[in-house]
Image (cartoon, rainbow, N blue to C red):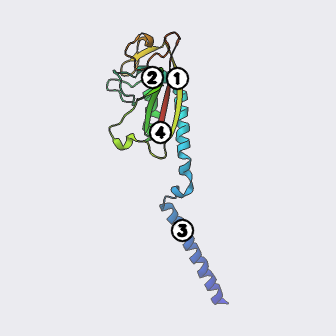
Amino acid sequence: MDRAQAYTLEGTIAAIVVVLAVFYGLQAVDTGPWSGDSDREPDQLGTQAADFLSVTAANGSLGEAVRCYSSSKPVIDGDSPAGDPAPFERQLNHTFDRQGVNYNLYVSYWTGSDGRERAVLTSTDDDSLAIPQQNAGSATYQLALYDDDRARYGDDCSDEGPRISDLDDFYVPDVNEDSQLYNVVEVRLIVW
């Protein structure tokens, strides 16, 4: 009888040791690829991008960024060599850059009967970061520009310029000069 109890105790201790070894071993191994969480990441990034575009459109900074983009500000990337970045760029920094999330920002607009044209608003010196990965999320937002909207200038887009309909060199064309609607711009944000 004493011998049976010893075998039972030995087996119990061995089972506890095996369970603890498996438990500690799983903590050292990344089980993320097997858990299915990676399938949700593009959806979460897409939701975050859509929320970002909605918030910046509501507070007006998205429209300012679109009207500021020109030859004087060829890239909207959150960097400003002189002073503070524009409100839209500060929000990009806070929402994505500080979190280690890469992004590309595009605008496309009507060119009249020729269809649509696209402009890239962000760029990076690192080619490996410029191409969206498989787990990228995206969102689009359509923004109406009107003849009376003012162009924006300066590193922080704080300088108000003339009406966009009065500019000959504004990058978005007026698709109907008889209408107050200047053009409809689609802003596309891809994050990964």
N-terminal of the two: label 4 or label 1?
1
Q: Quadrant of the N terminus?
A: bottom right
N-terminal of the two: label 2 or label 1?
2
Of the residues shown, which amino acid type is indicated by label 1? Leu
> Where does the image place residue 38, in percent across and percent down from the top left?
53, 50
Under circle 3, the secondary element is: helix
N-terminal of the two: label 3 or label 4?
3
> Where does the image place residue 128, in percent across and percent down from the top left?
36, 44
Are the residues at dot 2 and dot 1 in contact (C-beta closer than 8 Å)? Answer: yes
Task: Indicate the quadrant where residue 10 lies.
Answer: bottom right
The residue beneath circle 2 is: 66
Question: In the image, which disc is placed on residue 191?
Answer: 4
Q: Which tag is nearer the camera, tag 1 or tag 3?
A: 1
> Of 10 and 49, which appears nearest the observer?
49
Under circle 2, the secondary element is: helix
The residue beneath circle 1 is: 143
64 w.r.t. 91: above or below: above
The residue beneath circle 3 is: 22
